[in-house]
Image (cartoon, grey):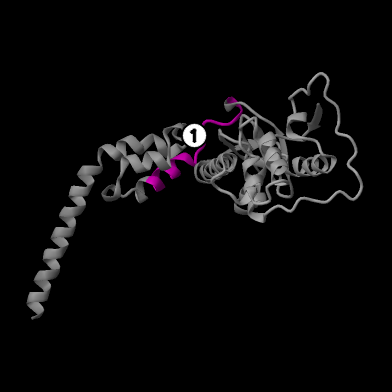
Amino acid sequence: MYSVALEDEADWVGWRRAARHLLAAGIPPEAVTWHPPDTPAGLFAGPPPPAPAGAPALAVPRDWLAMAERGIRHSDPERFALLYALLWDARAEPGLLRRPTEPRMQRLSAMARAVKRDAHKLHAFLRFREIDTAEGPRSIAWFEPEHHILEAEAGFFVRRFAILRWSILTPRRCAHWDGEAVTFAPGARRADAPAFDAAEDLWRTYFASIFNPARLKPEAMRAEMPKKYWKNLPEASIIPQLMQGASGRVKVMMGQEFVEGRKQRGSHRQEG
């Protein structure tokens, strides 16, 4: 049995380098165990043997590589083994990695889609709260991702909030931006993030102003913004109130439109 130690839970570069070596050395999937940090290796596991010089590399489709890179961020503990098993079998079946109906390919595709959805929720539902520190203001956010997405998505927040000093805390991993570089640290607790700041009233005011009761579709809204995210969204506290008063606001809006329509028709008759 051979053991591969990975640097983190989504170590795409390390996994890919190890997979190339293992394939070249002819090590089958059942003889390999993959170990992210804090995961002990098997008692009798050792490093893979040297790969033979000049071993041919496996040609892999680019779209498969993109899907695998995303899929490796999934929380499924079998993700590393799944990817390597697909590569191993692709040596004998060159078309395997282009066959979407193959069960393992379907599983990988579903994993990649789940990671993409999780990243979308992170972008949409992260809310920073500002605190004072010895170095000046720092914006801190708490989020509970389902998968190992923070390292890959930190760049999004660097681009969007480059002028802020911020920290994103999650149970899995934390990211800290100091204006020049992002550093990562072990996961945190919900209590480590502030529960309130002065900007929350602005979020509620803004959300109430853009809420359109005429387009309210509760089931669609809950699908896009599941309730598990509400506890970390300042505007979520007013959602029940806005939903409860939606029908009344629609009637008011319709009444206003009716009055405006009568006024316009009346002015047209006078002009005629």
Occupied quadrant, residue 149:
top right
Above/below status of 11 relative to 266: above
Above/below status of 221 relative to 47: below
Residue 203: give x, y in percent of width and height. 44, 44
Q: How crowded is mark 1: few (under 14 residues within 10 Å), some or many (20 or more)?
A: many
Residue 256: give x, y in percent of width and height. 18, 56
Occupied quadrant, residue 79:
top right
The residue wearing badge 1 is 232
Occupied quadrant, residue 73:
top right
Residue closer to the observer: 227 or 233:
227
Residue at 81% of width from left, 18% of height from top? 43
- Residue 196 falls within the magenta-colored stretch: yes
Marker count (numbered):
1
Residue closer to the observer: 120 or 77:
77
- Where does the N terminus fall, quadrant-wise? top right
Residue at 32% of width from left, 35% of height from top? 240
Residues drawn in magenta: 191-207
Residue at 29% of width from left, 39% of height from top? 243
- Where does the C terminus fall, quadrant-wise? bottom left
Residue 241: give x, y in percent of width and height. 30, 36
Element at badge 1?
Answer: helix
